Amino acid sequence: DQQVKQNSPSLSVQEGRISILNCDYTNSMFDYFLWYKKYPAEGPTFLISISSIKDKNEDGRFTVFLNKSAKHLSLHIVPSQPGDSAVYFCAATPSGSARQLTFGSGTQLTVLP
Amino acid sequence: GAVVSQHPSRVICKSGTSVKIECRSLDFQATTMFWYRQFPKQSLMLMATSNEGSKATYEQGVEKDKFLINHASLTLSTLTVTSAHPEDSSFYICSASRLAGGRQETQYFGPGTRLLVL
């Protein structure tokens, strides 16, 4: 039973446009969410996180939105750049601590020049 | 800050041998480190949680006698794959947690180790 789901295995976006990556979760105990970016043969890189007490967190080109009632979060990247092409994982954890991360299956983002 | 290194980056070994992978937090002290495994086109699967000075906590289905974890200091954890077999071939990633943005911890990942068992 997947508690964190990324239903789109891949996404292609034109350079300069907005990339929207989606993530759904089922465990209502999750209250801290993170996005990681991963290149092939490398470890994931932390991008941005959001606590359940917020519905939006912004950091430069990256914005994460959280809809608790829908158990849905999304990562917006604008403007998208070719260097953003990577696999993006969302992760969730209960208790506001990153001690027990449950990862989604990832979405391969390709930004076309 | 928050750099985590792993060594080696890749290793090829014969079936039946043991392989040790090191994970270091370079610029911070990590009381907790985590070991993950990732098979091709799949998500990261947590294998075990390692706390400095105590025994690791293994996830269900992970053999603790096969995957030995030692967390000897606040900056070093090691994973030893004992008597490796071809099915152990995978990408092993460690992470270390530290406080970020207030009281919330965030995990920072190493670059991973590609293990190929022949």
Image (tube, coloured by chain):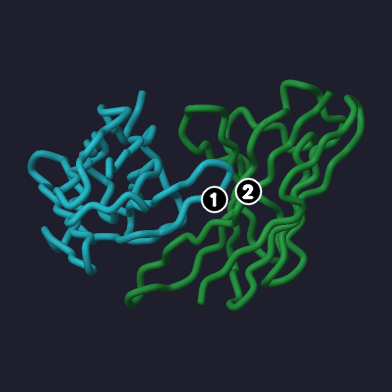
Chain colours: A cyan, B green
Q: What residue is pinned by disc 2?
A: B112
> Which residue reaches farthest left?
A69
- Residue visible at 57% across and 29% down? B39
- Location of residue A83 in the rendering, given as x and y in whole percent from the top left corner: 37, 53
User: Where residue B50 appears, x then y in whole percent?
Assistant: 64, 55
Q: Are marks 1 and 2 in contact (CB under 8 Å)?
A: yes
- Please state which of residues A64 and A103 is positioned toward the viewer in this rendering: A64
Of residue B31 and residue B35, the one placed in the foreground of this image is B35
Screen quadrant of the N terminus of chain A: top left
| Label at residue B83 | none
Quarter of the picture containing the C terminus of chain A is top left
Q: Quadrant of residue B60?
A: top right
- Mark 1 and mark 2: span between their CA atoms? 5 Å
Classify mark 1: residues with Cα within 10 Å, few (<14), some (14-19) or many (20+): many
Tag count: 2
Res A43 label:
1
Badge 2: chain ID: B
Q: Mark 2 falls on what kind of element?
A: loop
Q: Residue placed at 28% from the left, 33% from the top?
A: A6
Whether B116 is drawn above or below A13: the answer is above
**Residue type indicated by callout 2:** Gly
In the image, farthest residue toward the front: A113
Classify mark 1: helix, strand or loop: loop
Subunit that carries the residue with mark 1? A
Q: What x and y, as percent, mark residue B13?
A: 87, 33
**Image position of B25 with respect to A19: above or below:** below
**Observer-nearest of A14 and B98:** A14
Q: Amino acid at mark 1?
A: Gly
